[in-house]
Image (cartoon, rainbow, N blue to C red):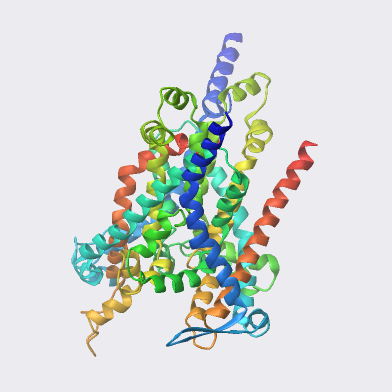
C-alpha cells in the first residue's frame, strides 16, 4: 500500500514540476503564457503586413467576392503594375535613396565627432552644451520650420538636397541629439587606456580619433546610420515643405497616391470597375513604398537587435 | 602642464564646433526669429517679407478666436495622458518577455521592432485609414455598443478611445521596447542569483530589483514617448499649424505663435511627467 501512495505522490510531483516548474520560470504553464503573449502581440504587428500583402495580390473579382478572404484565387500582379506606374517606382526609389542615405551618413559622421568631443574632453561650457543638445530634441520642428524655410529660401537651396544635408552636417538634423547621445555613451564606456598609449607614442588627437576610436565604435555607427536612415526615409512633413515639387520620395508619392492615380487613369463615366482605384492597387502602392525599408531591416536586423546591447544606448 | 590642458580644451572645442556652429545657425537663430515673428503680422510681398508689430495679438487670437486650436490641444492632452502610460507599461512588458530564455528569440525580436520602421512614416496612416489597426469586428460586441450609447461619461470616453486605438498605441512602442530591452540585458546576473539564494520569488525580484533599476530608463522613455507623440507629423495640432502657415489671412506670424504655444505646452507636459517620476522616487528611498 505504501509503495502505491509513494508512487502516486511521485507522479503528482512530476506533473506538478512539469506544469509549474522548479523555479517558477521553467514550468509548462509559464512557458505557455509567455509564448501565448508573444505570439498574440506579434500577430498584432504582423497582421497589417499580411493584410497588405494579401490584398495587394487580389484581383478585382477577388476583392468583390466575400468568400475570398486570405488566399486569392489567382496570383494577380496587375495591382503592382499599376502602382508601379503611379509611383514611378524605380526613379522615385533612386531619388528617395539619394535624399535619405546622404543626410543619414552626414548625420552619423558628425554625431560621432561631436559625441567623441563631449565624452573625451573637458572644456568650458560643456555642461551648458549638454543641456542644449538635449533641448534640441524637445524643440518641435515646427518652431524652427518657418525661419529655416525663409533662410533656405534666401540661400536658394529649397528644393535641393542641401535643405536636408546642411542641417545634418552641422548636427541639427532629424533627432540628431539622440545620435550624439549614443556616441557620447559609447565613447564614455570605452576604456581610455588604448588612446592614452597611442598618445604616448605621439599620435595626435585627430589621428587617435580616426584610427582607434572610430573603428571601435562600429556598433554605434551602424545603429546610428540605420535609425537615421529610417527616420529620414519616413520624414514627409519636412520633405514636403523643403523639397516642394523638385524632389520626391516614395512616402511622399504614397501620400498623394489617390490624386496621382486619378490624374493618370481618369475614371470613365458609366463604366464601373475597369480603371477605378481599388483597395488592391492602394495596398500594392503601400507595399512598394515600405518594401525597400523592410528589406533593409530584415538584412540588418541582426545589428538592430544586437547593436542595441553594444552601442550603449542606455548608458551605464 | 597648463599649456597641455589648454590644448585639450581647444581640441575638445574643435570636436564639438560643428554642432555649436549648426546650433547657432539652424536652431538658436531660427528659434529667436520665430519668437520675433510670433509678435508680428507677417505679409509676404514682392519685395520680401513685411512685418507689423501686433504685440500679443497672435496669442490672443489663438485662445479667443481660433476654436479649432484650443479644441485640438485639449484632445491632444487628454489622449496623451491616456496613451503614454500604456505605451510605457506595454513596452516594458514586451521587453521583459523578450528578455526571457525563449526559443525563436531572434524571430520575435525582429517582429517586435517592426514598429520602429513602419510607425514613423505615412504607411501607418494608410493602414489606419484602411481600418486594419482596429480590433476586427469590435463593433459587434455588447460592451462596445453599451459604451457607444452613452459616450459622455469620463471613463466611458477613455474606454472607447482605448478600444478604438489600442492597436495604434501598441504600434508606437517600438523604440521604447528597444531601450528597455537594452537596459534589461545590462543588468547584472549576479544580483539575480544572490536574490534567488535569499529566497526571493520572481515576483518580488521584479518589483524590488528590476523595476527600481529601470527607473532612469522609464524616465528616458517617458521623455521620448511624449516628444515623438507630440511632433509626429500626423498629429492634428501640427496639421493645424501647417495649414495656418500657408493661409493668407493668418500667415507666418500666427503659425509661429501657434508653434510657440505648442512648444511651451510640450515643455510643461515634459517637466510635469519627469517631476512626478522623480518625486515618487525620492519618497521611496528616503
- The residue located at (56%, 54%) in the rendering is B225
- B225, A164: nearer the viewer: A164
The percent coordinates of residue A72 (x first, y second) are 25, 61
Quadrant the C terminus of chain A occupies: top right
Farthest right residue in view:
B286
- The residue located at (38%, 65%) in the rendering is A163
Quadrant the N terminus of chain A occupies: top right
The image shows a total of numbered marks equal to 0
Q: Is residue B158 left or right of residue B109?
A: right
Residue A24, placed above or below residue A90: above
Q: Is residue A117 left or right of residue B212?
A: left
Residue B262, placed above or below residue A39: below
The quarter of the displayed image where residue B83 is located: bottom right
The percent coordinates of residue A228 (x first, y second) are 40, 52
The percent coordinates of residue B156 (x first, y second) are 66, 67
- The residue located at (35%, 50%) in the rendering is A105
- The residue located at (79%, 42%) in the rendering is B283
The quarter of the displayed image where residue B271 is located: bottom right
- B3, B159: nearer the viewer: B3
- B246, B109: nearer the viewer: B246
- A168, A268: nearer the viewer: A168
Residue A289 visible? The answer is yes
Residue A33 visible? The answer is no
Residue A5, placed above or below residue B155: above
The percent coordinates of residue A102 (x first, y second) are 32, 54
Amino acid at each position: 500500500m505504501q509503495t502505491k501512495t509513494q508512487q502516486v505522490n511521485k507522479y503528482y510531483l512530476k506533473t506538478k514540476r512539469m506544469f509549474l516548474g522548479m523555479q517558477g520560470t521553467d514550468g509548462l504553464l509559464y512557458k505557455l503564457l509567455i509564448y501565448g503573449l508573444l505570439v498574440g502581440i506579434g500577430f498584432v504587428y504582423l497582421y497589417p503586413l499580411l493584410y497588405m500583402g494579401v490584398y495587394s495580390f487580389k484581383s478585382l473579382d477577388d476583392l468583390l467576392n466575400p468568400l475570398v478572404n486570405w488566399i486569392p484565387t489567382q496570383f494577380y500582379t496587375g495591382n503592382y503594375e499599376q502602382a508601379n506606374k503611379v509611383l514611378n517606382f524605380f526613379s522615385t526609389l533612386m531619388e528617395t535613396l539619394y535624399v535619405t542615405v546622404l543626410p543619414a551618413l552626414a548625420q552619423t559622421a558628425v554625431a560621432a565627432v561631436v559625441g567623441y568631443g563631449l565624452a573625451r574632453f573637458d572644456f568650458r561650457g560643456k555642461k551648458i552644451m549638454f543641456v542644449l543638445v538635449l533641448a534640441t530634441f524637445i524643440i518641435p520642428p515646427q518652431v524652427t520650420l518657418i525661419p529655416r524655410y525663409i533662410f533656405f529660401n534666401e540661400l536658394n537651396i529649397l528644393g535641393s538636397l542641401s535643405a536636408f544635408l546642411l542641417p545634418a552636417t552641422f548636427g541639427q538634423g532629424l533627432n540628431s541629439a539622440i545620435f550624439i547621445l549614443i556616441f557620447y555613451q559609447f565613447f564614455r564606456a570605452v576604456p581610455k587606456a588604448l588612446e592614452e598609449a597611442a598618445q604616448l607614442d605621439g599620435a595626435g588627437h585627430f589621428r587617435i580619433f580616426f584610427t582607434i576610436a572610430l573603428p571601435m565604435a562600429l556598433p554605434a555607427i551602424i545603429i546610428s546610420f540605420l535609425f537615421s536612415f529610417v527616420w529620414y526615409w519616413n520624414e514627409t512633413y519636412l520633405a514636403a515643405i523643403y523639397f516642394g515639387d523638385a524632389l520626391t520620395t516614395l512616402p511622399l508619392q504614397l501620400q498623394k497616391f489617390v490624386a496621382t492615380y486619378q490624374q493618370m487613369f481618369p475614371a470613365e463615366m458609366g463604366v464601373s470597375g475597369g480603371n477605378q482605384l481599388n483597395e488592391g492597387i492602394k495596398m500594392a502602392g503601400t507595399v512598394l513604398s515600405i518594401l525597400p525599408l523592410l528589406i533593409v531591416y530584415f538584412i540588418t536586423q541582426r545589428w538592430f537587435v544586437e547593436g542595441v546591447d553594444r552601442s550603449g544606448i542606455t548608458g551605464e | 602642464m597648463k599649456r597641455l590642458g589648454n590644448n585639450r580644451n581647444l581640441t575638445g572645442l574643435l570636436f564639438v564646433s560643428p554642432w555649436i556652429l549648426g546650433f547657432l545657425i539652424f536652431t538658436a537663430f531660427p528659434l529667436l526669429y520665430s519668437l520675433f515673428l510670433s509678435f508680428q503680422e507677417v505679409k509676404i510681398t514682392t519685395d520680401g517679407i513685411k512685418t507689423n508689430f501686433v504685440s500679443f495679438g497672435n496669442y490672443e487670437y489663438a485662445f479667443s478666436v481660433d476654436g479649432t486650436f484650443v479644441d485640438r490641444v485639449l484632445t491632444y492632452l487628454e489622449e496623451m495622458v491616456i496613451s503614454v502610460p500604456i505605451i510605457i507599461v506595454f513596452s516594458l512588458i514586451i521587453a521583459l518577455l523578450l528578455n526571457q530564455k525563449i526559443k525563436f528569440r531572434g524571430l520575435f525580436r525582429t517582429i517586435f521592432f517592426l514598429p520602429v520602421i513602419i510607425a514613423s512614416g505615412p504607411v501607418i496612416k494608410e493602414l489606419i485609414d484602411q481600418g486594419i489597426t482596429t480590433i476586427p469586428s469590435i463593433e459587434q460586441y455588447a460592451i462596445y455598443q453599451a459604451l457607444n450609447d452613452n459616450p459622455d461619461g469620463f471613463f466611458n470616453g477613455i474606454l472607447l478611445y482605448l478600444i478604438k486605438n489600442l492597436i495604434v498605441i501598441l504600434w508606437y512602442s517600438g523604440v521604447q521596447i528597444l531601450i528597455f530591452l537594452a537596459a534589461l540585458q545590462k543588468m547584472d546576473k549576479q544580483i539575480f542569483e544572490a536574490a534567488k539564494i535569499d529566497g526571493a520569488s520572481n515576483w518580488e525580484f521584479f518589483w524590488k530589483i528590476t523595476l527600481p533599476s529601470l527607473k532612469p530608463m522609464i524616465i528616458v522613455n517617458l521623455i521620448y514617448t511624449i516628444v515623438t507623440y507630440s511632433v509626429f507629423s500626423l498629429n492634428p495640432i501640427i496639421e493645424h499649424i501647417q495649414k495656418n502657415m500657408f493661409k493668407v489671412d493668418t500667415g507666418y506670424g500666427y503659425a509661429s505663435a501657434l508653434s510657440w504655444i505648442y512648444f511651451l505646452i510640450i515643455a510643461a507636459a515634459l517637466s510635469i511627467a519627469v517631476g512626478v517620476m522623480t518625486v515618487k522616487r525620492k519618497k521611496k528611498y528616503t
